[in-house]
Structures are given as C-alpha cells and as structure tokens.
Image (tube, rainbow, N blue to C red):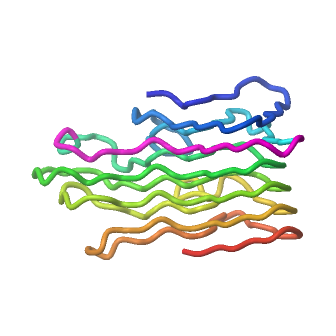
Amino acid sequence: KENAVTVSGTGNVTLELDGKNELTGGTGTVQNDRYMTRARAGLKSENNKTTITDSDGNGTLIATGGTIVVDDSYASAKSGHIAAGFGIDGAAVAGGTIVAKGGDVVFESSASGNAPYFAAGSGILTTEISGGIVEATGGSAIGNGTLGGLSEAGSGVGGEDASAGVFKTKITGGTVKATGGNAKNSGGYAGGFGIRVDNGVSISGGTVIAQG
C-alpha cells in the first residue's frame, strides 16, 4: 500500500539508472496527497529535489502508479474525490529511458450508493525534463461497473484538477511523448490531456509529442 520508492530528506538527490528498473505503486490511498485522497506512486520525491540520470546510457525506469479498483466497498466511501497514483511524482528527469504510467481506475461494482468521483493517475508530475527519453501516459478508466463516476482520465505530463497547478514544468531537452489516458465510452467522461500544467509549461529544447 506504499509508494514503490519514496525519496525523502531536505537535500538534492540524484538517482542513477543502471539496467532495467520497474516500480509499481500500491493501491492503498492516503489523504491530502497533492490535495486529494490518492493511491501510491511508482516513484515519489517528497521534497521535489530528486533528479533521475543515466550517465552511462544503459538505464531504464518503468514506473506505474497504483490502481483504484471501484468495488462494493466504495458504496459507503466518505471521500468525495479519489485519484489513482502517479507513475512518477515530483522527480525531474535528466537522462535515461523513462516509461511513466499513471494508475488506472477500474470500475467493477454496480452496487447502489453515493460513491465518490475518481480520477485516473498522471504519468509524471515534474518540474523539469532536460534529457533522456520520456514516454508518459495517463491512466485510463476500465470496466463496466456503474458505481462511481470518472472526473477525468490521467494526463501524460502534469496532473488532474487538484494537482495540475502544483508545479511549473520546463522541458529543455530530451524526447518527450505525452499521451492522455482513455475515458469510458459513455457518460460524458473526460479523456486525459497529453500535457496539463496549469501553472505553465515552457518548452525550450528537445522534441515533444503530446496527444490527448
């Protein structure tokens, strides 16, 4: 029920990638995480001072946010808005091959009840991408259950209503492919943004492909 990896402390931290690394956040939720009740991240930088690097060019990180499974227990849930986990939360990318996938929302239950709204997780919430290859995909809504509603699918880069304004994001190098998640086929749910950074995103280098 935890983040797969959590970086804490007050100083700057560099994560050097070697070989293939896979991280998947837990499905347990915590309140007041980026202003929402939220499942766990694949990689979370609590102080937002973590930089992912790959000095020898052989490193890959696959980070996936925790999934929210909307089962019968949510028929009596008290929280009004619950989000799946970020693939990467708070870390900058300077190198490596990064595959960041937001957690999905799986609608399984058709029980009656006043269930909350759900948001799928974003691929990466970050201050800067300056190098490497970053493939960031927002989480999607899956399943045919009728309990609960989807507020929005996940963004590739950035966040949802609550977290999209946390950072300004700079893209100064590297290759970034940002793809929004898919919403359910009915009910007017919103698909995800390729990039959603409400405080502003600046692109001064690299290659960026964004698709909602």
Question: What residue lies at 59% left-to-right and 75% top-to-bottom?
Answer: 211
Foreground residue among 169 and 3: 3
Q: Quadrant of residue 12?
A: top right
Foreground residue among 189 and 95: 95
Relative to residue 176, is residue 78 depicted above or below?
above
Relative to residue 59, is residue 138 depicted above or below?
below
Q: Is residue 62 left or right of residue 53?
A: left
Image coordinates for residue 109, horizontal then vertical, percent = 17, 50
Image quarter (top left, top right, bottom left or bottom right) of the C terminus: bottom right
Image coordinates for residue 54, horizontal then vertical, percent = 83, 42
Relative to residue 22, is residue 1 depicted above or below?
above
Image quarter (top left, top right, bottom left or bottom right) of the N terminus: top left
Question: What residue lies at 49% left-to-right and 52% top-to-bottom?
Answer: 121
Q: Is residue 201 left or right of residue 166?
A: right
Image coordinates for residue 29, horizontal then vertical, percent = 42, 35
Span shown in magenta: 55-73
Q: Is residue 61 left or right of residue 206?
A: left
Question: What residue lies at 46% left-to-right and 49% top-to-bottom?
Answer: 103
Q: Is residue 95 left or right of residue 69?
A: right
Asked if the magenta segment contains residue 199, the reply would be no
Total count of labels:
0
Foreground residue among 199 and 135: 135
Question: What residue lies at 42% left-to-right and 56% top-to-bottom?
Answer: 119
